[in-house]
Structure formats: structure tokens, C-alpha cells
Image (cartoon, rainbow, N blue to C red):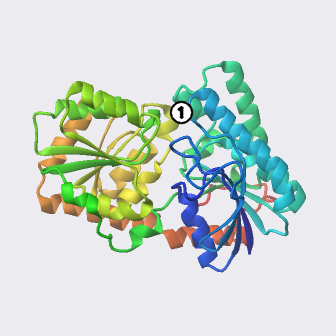
Amino acid sequence: MRILVVTQMFWPENFRINDLVAGFVDRGHDVVVLTGLPNYPAGKLFPGYGHRGPWTETYAGARVLRVPLIPRGAAGGVELAINYLSFALAASVIAPLRCRGPFDAIFVYEPSPVTVCLPAIVLKKLLHAPIFFWVLDLWPDSIRAVGAIRSEAALTAISRMVRFIYHACDWILVQSPAFTEEIEKFGVDARKILFFPSWADQVFATPAKPTNLLQDLPPGRRIMFAGNIGAAQDFPAVIDAAEILKGRPDLQWIIVGDGRMASWARAEVARRGLHNIHFWGSHPIESMPAILSAADILLVSLRADPVFERTIPGKIQAYLASGRAIIGMLKGAGASVIDESGAGLTCAPGDPQGLAEAAVRMADMSVQQIAALGRAGRAYYERHFERDMLFDRLEAWMKGRDLPDMHDSRPTLMQE
């Protein structure tokens, strides 16, 4: 097949779409990626990129076509809006000149923003190829939840845009079954909504490679958070939990990643004089298996909000694949995965006391008990989120197989 991938974020930015593209190429498909200039998460263009491009590159055998955009800067509300709209506009105007067909499918990756689908809709009219829209973030619910936009008029306008986008797509892929009901509220036929969860990047399929980071590990049981440090991850509650346990020097908290709240989190830890929290910054995906292997317990957290209850955070799959025990400060779909897998413990979102108690309970387990939790998580991952199994499913859909019959008037369940 010849596949066009539309994504605002792409290599050298660290997103799961990179692995999907590499997987498509490995399976013998001709892949073209339409994307912007890399600027996430720092908010400025990566070294080697500027107003002169480069506009054409190659990644893992795929042809990468870039369009200009305005970097996200400090990621304030106005800056993000400009960043999102600049890519959507530039791609809509430039892509028809550069993305020459034919294509068998257009795959759109949406961790946020939903506007990434607008250029794909323009291209669909020109290329006559079906759109597979992978929704990992529900708009406008998610931006309302983090307070990015508070104007009801603006949120109403965004809802109308979301409705237009959903109806313009041929198939909507959701990372959590709980997304289905919310998307149906926009008048979308449930038969065009397909369950397609995230998976762990391919680097987790091979033994972890050594890294110099592991030379300076804090002693004791290590609780590690890895990923985006943003408003949704509720770092105030995480820091509160670590402060509750500051009298337990055998419990050390390691934070790996970056994001909008990273500077605040560092400053807050310093202000409170906490010595049991360590920030390791961002690292390439190739280093993550080794880094996660340094943890005894892995932490995932989400704020208390209905939209987050419907989400399965992508890091959960990586955590399960790493074979490490997990603590989740969240509820809903993500908590269900942790509980059903037997990989660890969960507590209510926004509950630092509950998180502290879960951390103590798990840290006081034997090495063998903690290892058993990790093995259970890995086994669950292989049954439900294994990469090749999911790629087989997506490939079949793109070839027109195993899809619901849209002409059948009988009600159908979302495919799993």
C-alpha cells in the first residue's frame, strides 16, 4: 500500500507515530509523512531546522515532507493556538502541491491538536483516499479540563469544528473504548469507530541497553515517573505525596521527562527542600528501556476529570512492556488496565495521601512480590497491546478487511 501519514509532531520529536511509520515501512509499504518543523517540547525549533527547512527528509525509509509552522514557545494558550493553526493552514495550502497521489489511505495522528486533521480533509478531496483518524485526545473536553480555554463561545466553536472533522473522516480509531460514547455525541455512527490502543515502542521488545545515567542511582526503592510533565499529570499531588514520605529515605522519586510544568515542579521541590525527588530530564526513546529498568516501581498520574477517566495514558503500555510494577494515581480506563493486569496498585486521582500509602505498601513488599507484579503486567501487555498484533489489525482495516458493514442497518459493537 501507499500510505500518507499526517501528523503535526514527528521525528526527531519523540512520539509513537515514529514507530508506526517505521513499522509500516518494515511491512513493505510506501510511506509519505506530512509534518511540521520539530519544536516539541522546548517550544523552539530543533538545531538544524529553520525558516529554510529542511523541507524534505527521510526517516526509517519513509519520505518526510515538512511545512513551516510557528513554534509553540512557552506553550501558553495563545501560543499553542497559533502553533496549531499555523501548521493546519500551512499544510492545507502546501500539501496539495507536494503530496502527489495516488494513496491507498490517509492516516492522521492526533495526540493533540484535533486541527491536525484539517489538512487531511483537504487532501482527501484531492486524493480520494479514506481517512483513518487516530484520536488519542478528546477535544474540546481535554482543553477544558486543563483550563487552556475557558471561553464558552470558543469551546462551542471548537465543538463545531470537531463535529465537522469527525464526520469528514471515514474511520475514527480510538485509544480507549471509553472514547466511543463521547464521539457518538457528535452524531457519529458507532460503526465507524474502531478500538486501536497504543503499544510500547519497538525498543521495549529487545533487552535494555546500558546507559551512563544508571551510575548515579539514589539508594533505596525507586519510584519513577516517565513522560510529559504537564497540567494533566497533577504534579502538585505527586510532590505532596513525596513530601508526606520525606521521612522515608528508603523511598526515592525519580522524574524523567519534560513539559509545561517541569520548571514549576523543579522550583517547588527546591522551595520545599525535598531531597527525595530527582529530576533526570528528557532522554531519547532508545534509552528508556534501560532507564525504566532502574525503577522498582513506575508511576502514572492523571488529574481528576471525566475526560481523563476515559483515557488510557500511553505510558501505561510502555510500563507494562518494561515488566515493572506500577502505581496509578488515576481512575477510569487507565486504572482498569492496571487493576485487571495485576501489575500494581491504584489510588484516586488528586489523592497524595492515597498515593503515599500505595507507595509504602508496594515498597514494603519483597523483591519477589514486586517482580511478580511486573511479570503479570508484561503478560497482560502481550495479550492486549502487542505491537505486531495491533499492526496486523490496522493493516487489515486499511486493506478494507475486517471493517464493519456501513450499509448494514443493524446495530454493531465497536470492534476490539
Q: Label 1, on which residue? A: 74
Residue farthest along the right direction in this orientation: 126
Q: In this orientation, which residue lies closer to the viewer: 347 or 118?
A: 118
Q: Nearest the camera: 295 or 382?
A: 295
Vertical relation: 200 (above or below) 401: above
- Residue 314: x %, y % from top left: 47, 52
Q: Can the viewer see residue 27?
A: yes
Q: Is residue 110 left or right of residue 389?
A: right
Instruction: Assess disc 1: are there few (<14), some (14-19) or many (≥20) residues with their C-alpha within 10 Å of its C-alpha.
Output: some
Horizontal side, residue 194 vs residue 378: left or right: right
Residue at figure coordinates x 16%, y 34% from the top left: 245
Secondary-structure class at tag 1: loop
Tell me what residue is drawn at x 76 percent, y 36 percent.
161
Residue at the image point whose x is 42% and y is 40% from the top: 229
Q: Is residue 350 visible?
A: no
Determine which quarter of the picture holds residue 357.
top left
Q: Is residue 237 above or below residue 43?
A: above
Q: Position of residue 278 (x, y in %)?
A: 25, 43
Q: In front: 80, or 364? A: 80
- Give residue 165's position: percent from left, percent from top: 76, 44
Instruction: Count all numbered tags in the image, as a single digit.
Output: 1
410 on left or right of 284: right
Q: Amino acid at mark 1?
A: Ala
Q: Quadrant of the N terminus?
A: bottom right
Q: Quadrant of the C terminus?
A: bottom right
* Position of residue 326 measured from the top left corner of the image (x, y, whole percent): 29, 51
Please give the name of the residue rendered at 65% of the width and 19% of the height, measured from the top-left corner.
Answer: 151
Q: Residue furthest bottom?
A: 28
